[in-house]
Every structure is written in C-alpha cells, then in structure tokens.
Amino acid sequence: MNKEAEEYQKRAEERDKERQQLLQKEKSKKRKKSFVFIFLSLLIIAGIGYAFISRPDPSFYDSLINCLDEKDVKFYGSFQCPACASQKKLFNNAELLKNKVYVECGPLGGPLTAACSAAGIQNFPTWIFANGERIIGVTPLKTLAEKSNCPLDESLS
C-alpha cells in the first residue's frame, strides 16, 4: 500500500507540474497579446499624431487663396463631386477657399446655380482665370499659382 501511495503521490505531483506549466503558457500568451495590443495602440496613436502634425493648418493656405481672390480666379464645383473634394483637399479644406474662391454649382446632374450657368460651367472642377482661361479637373497648387501670378510657399507645392 505504501508503494501505491507513492505512485499516487507521484502522479499527483506530475499533474500539478503539468497544470503549472499550462498556467505559465497561458500567462505567457496573455503577456504576448497584451504586448501586441499595446504596441499596435501606440503605433496607431503615433500615426494619428503624425497626420495632424504633418498637415499644415488650413490658414497656411490663406495667402494663396487671398491672392487667387484678388486676381479674380474662381473655382466652380459641386458638393457631390469627388474630384472637387480632391481639389479642396489640396487646400486642406481651408474655410477661406469656400468663402472667397469657391462657387457651388449644385448637385451633380441637377440644375446649375445662376452663377455657374452664367459662367458656362459644364464640368467639375473648373477653374476660371481673369483672362477667361479655363482649367478643368483637379489642378496642382503650383499650376494655379503660376497661371494667376500668385506667390506660392514652396512647402505647399
């Protein structure tokens, strides 16, 4: 009976050892998952931070927008137009653009506003310069500055 008790004790110790090993593995997995979660969270936070830091404030574009306005340059577009949204994004969606240079023409496929009809707008986005020249499509800031004789901060181009 003594031998049976020893074997029973030995098996119990082995089971305890196996349980301890399983618990250690589980703890290790949890630590790895926690590390991965923390790492990914920090990476996401860093990416968002970089996006905000690297993007200039909308007022950064004010000098170009004011010059375009002074030179009577107009940007005709539609709030539903993806290319117009891309054009606005080049100006970092600056509020001044909407207030000075941008002319809303109405929904795509719908009736044009009076200003857009009078200007003969058929495609979006359309830029019209004081000399009557037109550019249709998303236009780089450098091109707009050159065509209008407006100074452009090199960090914008």
Image (tube, rainbow, N blue to C red):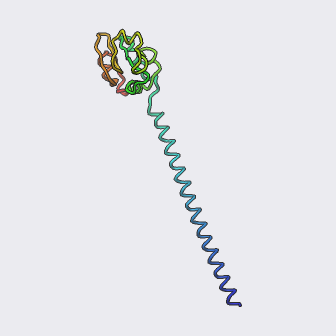
- Give whichever of 118, 157 is nearer the camera: 118
Question: Where's residue 152, x and y in %?
Answer: 35, 21
Number of numbered tags placed on the structure image = 0
Quadrant the C terminus occupies: top left
The quarter of the displayed image where residue 94 is located: top left
The quarter of the picture where residue 135 lies is top left
Using the image as rendered, state which of residue 153 and residue 17 is in the foreground.
17
Q: Is residue 42 above or below residue 121?
A: below
Between residue 7 and residue 58, name the one nearer to us: 7
Quadrant in the picture for the N terminus:
bottom right
| In the displayed structure image, the side of residue 141 where residue 43 appears, left or right | right
> Residue 116's x, y, as percent?
38, 12
- Residue at the spot 45% in from the left edge and 24% down from the top edge: 93
Most extreme residue toward the front, as rendered? 110
Q: Residue at x 61, y 66 (%)?
A: 23
User: Where does the image place residue 15, in percent across and percent down from the top left?
Assistant: 63, 75
Q: Residue at x 34, y 23 (%)?
A: 141
> Percent from the top left, x then y, of residue 84?
39, 24
